[in-house]
Image (cartoon, rainbow, N blue to C red):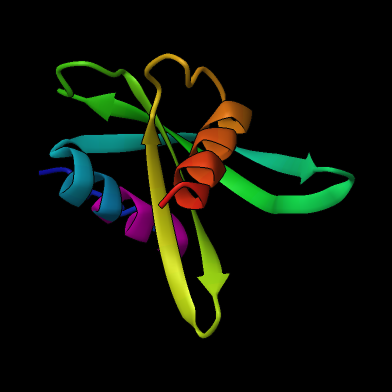
Amino acid sequence: MYAMSLVKMPPNIAELQKAIKQTHGCDSQHVASEQVYESFEGRTAWQGTVEIFDLIGHPQAKRAYAWTYQDHDQNKTVTVLHIPPVDSPQTAVKVAIASKAIK
């Protein structure tokens, strides 16, 4: 019998995977982290780390982008599928900002 060692991921990654599963109905595997800086009219619109995930069994997308941010005293989670026009962590952030602005 083989002993399996469990690889612990940072809590944030596990939380983001849970959000992807709840929102998009599929499992995911973390593949990378990327720093994103988005500005608008010379001011910082968003700055942080976007986590990149490969999706397992999603019917339309093979990848998703996810991150958390603080809105007043609450942590919020955003998940965005890699479906055009989204083709990178940067465009995922732009789409998320735009969708929040028009609500």
Q: Residue at x 46, y 79 (%)?
A: 74
The mark tally for this picture is 0
| Observer-nearest of 12 and 93 | 93
Front one among 9 and 40: 40
- Point out the residue furthest to the front here: 102
Question: In the image, is residue 89 above or below residue 25?
Answer: above
Question: In this image, 90 relative to 79: left or right?
Answer: right
Residue lying furthest right:
42
Rendering coords of residue 5 (x, y %): 30, 52
Q: Is residue 49 above or below residue 34?
A: below
Determine the residue positioned at 46% across, 73% down: 75
Q: Is residue 32 visible?
A: no
Q: Residue at x 25, y 54 (%)?
A: 18
Q: Is residue 58 left or right of residue 44?
A: left
Which image quadrant for residue 30? Answer: top left
Is 14 included in the stretch rendered in magenta? yes
Q: Quadrant of residue 20?
A: top left
Task: Give x and y (percent) for residue 39.
Answer: 79, 43
Q: Position of residue 102 (x, y in %)?
A: 46, 46
Q: Quadrant of residue 72?
A: bottom right
The one nearer the camera, 60 or 18, is 60
Q: Is residue 56 placed above or below 23 in the rendered structure? A: above
* Residue 45 visible to the viewer: yes
- Quick one: quadrant of the N terminus? top left
Q: Residue at horizontal 70%, vertical 40%?
A: 36
Q: Which residues are magenta?
A: 11-18
The answer to if 2 sits in the magenta stretch is: no
Main SS of the magenta part reads helix
From what the image shows, is residue 83 above or below residue 12? Answer: above
